[in-house]
Image (tube, grey):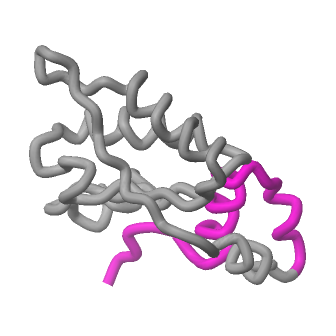
């Protein structure tokens, strides 16, 4: 069987630390997953995607809402199939939504970014 990726615990933790505003230097030697686990506390808020009157993604409004929630103390977010309306979004729109929310949360909160519902393994890896 041919390997489809070189994804392992170290690469996942490196990516996670990067989204948390950390440094991959922390992973030299033994990974430190406990520091990440300690930050997984409090309410987990699903992202309700905003749309314009023309039914297009309103990334500015969505980002402003997430920023407001962070200012109020929320530190955990996720994009999901249902709440974030992935069923109605193209892969490009899902990418744009995840990138937009990641930009607002970077270094301030944790974002668990979802993948398209019917994505194959390679596509899930790309979205990760």
Q: Is residue 67 left or right of residue 63?
A: right
Q: Residue 77 or 125: which is nearer the viewer?
A: 77
- On the image, the x and y values in percent for residue 121 come to 29, 67
Magenta stretch: residue 99 in it? no
In the displayed structure, would residue 47 be above or below residue 2?
above
Q: Residue at x 42, y 43 (%)?
A: 98
- On the image, the x and y values in percent for residue 49 come to 29, 40
- On the image, the x and y values in percent for residue 10 come to 68, 73
Q: Is residue 52 left or right of residue 29?
A: left
Furthest-front residue in this view: 72
Q: Residue at x 59, y 68 (%)?
A: 12
In the displayed structure, would residue 42 be above or below residue 34?
above
Q: Quadrant of residue 24?
A: bottom right
- On the image, the x and y values in percent for residue 22 come to 79, 54
Magenta stretch: residue 17 in it? yes
Q: Residue at x 24, y 55 (%)?
A: 83
Q: Is residue 22 left or right of residue 1?
A: right
| Quadrant in the picture for the C terminus | bottom left
Q: Residue 110 or 66: which is nearer the viewer?
A: 66
Q: Quadrant of residue 38?
A: bottom right
Furthest-top residue in this view: 54
In the displayed structure, would residue 100 be above or below residue 75?
above
| Quadrant in the picture for the N terminus | bottom left
The magenta segment = 1-29
């Amino acid at each position: 069987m041919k390997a489809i990726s070189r994804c392992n615990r170290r690469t996942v933790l490196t990516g996670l630390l990067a989204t948390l505003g950390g440094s991959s230097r922390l992973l030299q030697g033994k990974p430190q997953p406990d520091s990440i686990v300690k930050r997984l506390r409090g309410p987990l808020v699903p992202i309700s995607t905003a749309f314009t009157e023309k039914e297009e993604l309103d990334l500015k409004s969505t980002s402003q809402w997430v920023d407001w929630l962070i200012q109020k103390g929320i530190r955990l977010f996720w994009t999901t199939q249902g709440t974030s309306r992935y069923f109605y979004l193209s892969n490009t729109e899902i990418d744009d939504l995840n990138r937009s929310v990641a930009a607002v949360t970077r270094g301030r909160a944790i974002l668990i970014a979802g993948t398209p519902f019917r994505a194959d393994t390679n596509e899930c890896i790309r979205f990760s």
